[in-house]
Image (tube, rainbow, N blue to C red):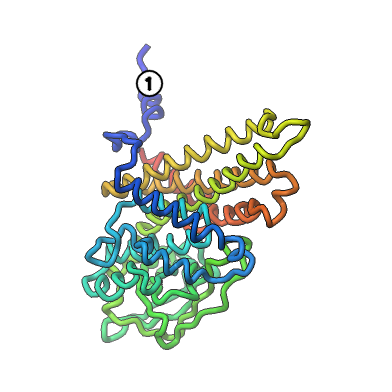
Amino acid sequence: MPVPKTATALAFPRPFPKVTRMNFELTEEQQLVLSTARDFARKEIAPKAAELDKTARWPREIVAQMADLGFLGLAVPTEYGGAGLDNVCYALVIEEVSAACASSGVIMSVNNSLFCDPLTKFGTDYQKKEILTPTAQGKMLGCFGLTEPTSGSDARTMLTVGEKQGDGGYLLNGSKNFITCGPEAEHIIVFAVTTPHPDKPRHTALIVRRDAAGYSVSPHDEKLGIKAAHSSSIYFDNVRVPAENILGEEGSGFKIAMATLDGGRIGIAAQAIGIARAAYEKAVAYSKERKAFRTPIANLQAIQFMIADMAVDLDAARLLTLRAATMKDKGVRHTAESAMAKLFASEMSSRVTHKALQIHGGYGYIAEYGVERHMRDARITEIYEGTSEIQRIVIAASALKG
């Protein structure tokens, strides 16, 4: 019986033909990077994670150490101060750092994915030399300003505006909120409406210095999780942005933002995996020690089923994330694949941390065991860099296009 064309399309979805070779082994370089990141995270970050969560202290010393290791510009070419590694290495390092401390993981992610990456792709020679290079080296930090108090998933409602000036620059007015690293960053990429229109406004990406007149930052937000990764609102009151700080072509801001988020979602997926893995490892260890009904609870089928589901979830999320990272390294469009990785990994992280807390029972609810921290940290991964609902829209659009 012949297979209907519709069935063939379902069996081999659009992304499949792009994968001509599948290699599940890490290269020697990737293995070395992974080993370095794991050793650093376990020795230098993990012992401080609980204190950072409790005090919401900016992890200045950890950021400095990540800079020394090249972790703040991992995929940036060496000529611009980066480590010159691939995006698979980047995902591996984010997972290790996030397994130790999710706050440190997202600080790293923002600097790499949301600031250095768009400057690498769209920046001028001046921007790469004067702004990208010291940021990739970790001498300063960058952040990303898309979300506003009344504009999140729907960028058409953006109220921040840039008014063209006679010298070719812009006069910037408006505000951005939930800006991770906002209180600490030296530069922010701001997306502003530069051609107003009720249905199709055009946006331009502008690189704004923290010390610009009219630039102000609110106190950092008090959050449920990732407390040490400070976020804040940033305000622009007649801030003058020189022409040399226009990123990419004028009017192409929305495309730059979407391209940046494609890569950023790989970082958040890896962060979610790290958070979940930490909770999973604690749950497995605890299940071997805790006894109930005269036996370690690891011998109870109910616990074994939870652990099995957690293990499958983690592996599936990691494979999706490494696929997206590999496609990015090959220069292949990866919008849908990054959305899939981010959607699955973030929702997986909430499931796994929930199960890990359940396995710990009452002890999981106590801060001393650290599992409740992972559960709180996991929740944000379903929200930032595009909510789960937005990821589903992106994935559906790709599926229906084919």
Q: Quadrant of residue 196?
A: bottom left
Residue type marked 1: Pro
Q: What residue is disc 1 on? A: 4
Image quadrant where one finds the N terminus? top left
Callout 1: few (<14), some (14-19), or many (20+) C-alpha neighbours within 10 Å? few
Q: Where is residue 296 in the image (x, y as percent from the top left)?
A: 70, 34
Q: Where is residue 168 in the image (x, y as percent from the top left)?
A: 27, 81
Could you tell me which residue is drawn at 23 percent across and 70 percent down? 124
Could you tell me which residue is drawn at 40 percent across and 24 percent down? 7
Q: Is residue 234 above or below residue 371?
A: below
Q: Is residue 378 visible?
A: yes
* Left or right of residue 96, residue 347 in this image: right
Q: Position of residue 383 (x, y in %)?
A: 54, 56
* Left or right of residue 113, residue 344 in this image: right
Image quadrant where one finds the C terminus? top left
Q: Residue furthest bottom?
A: 213
Q: Position of residue 365 (x, y in %)?
A: 72, 52
Q: What element carries label 1?
A: loop
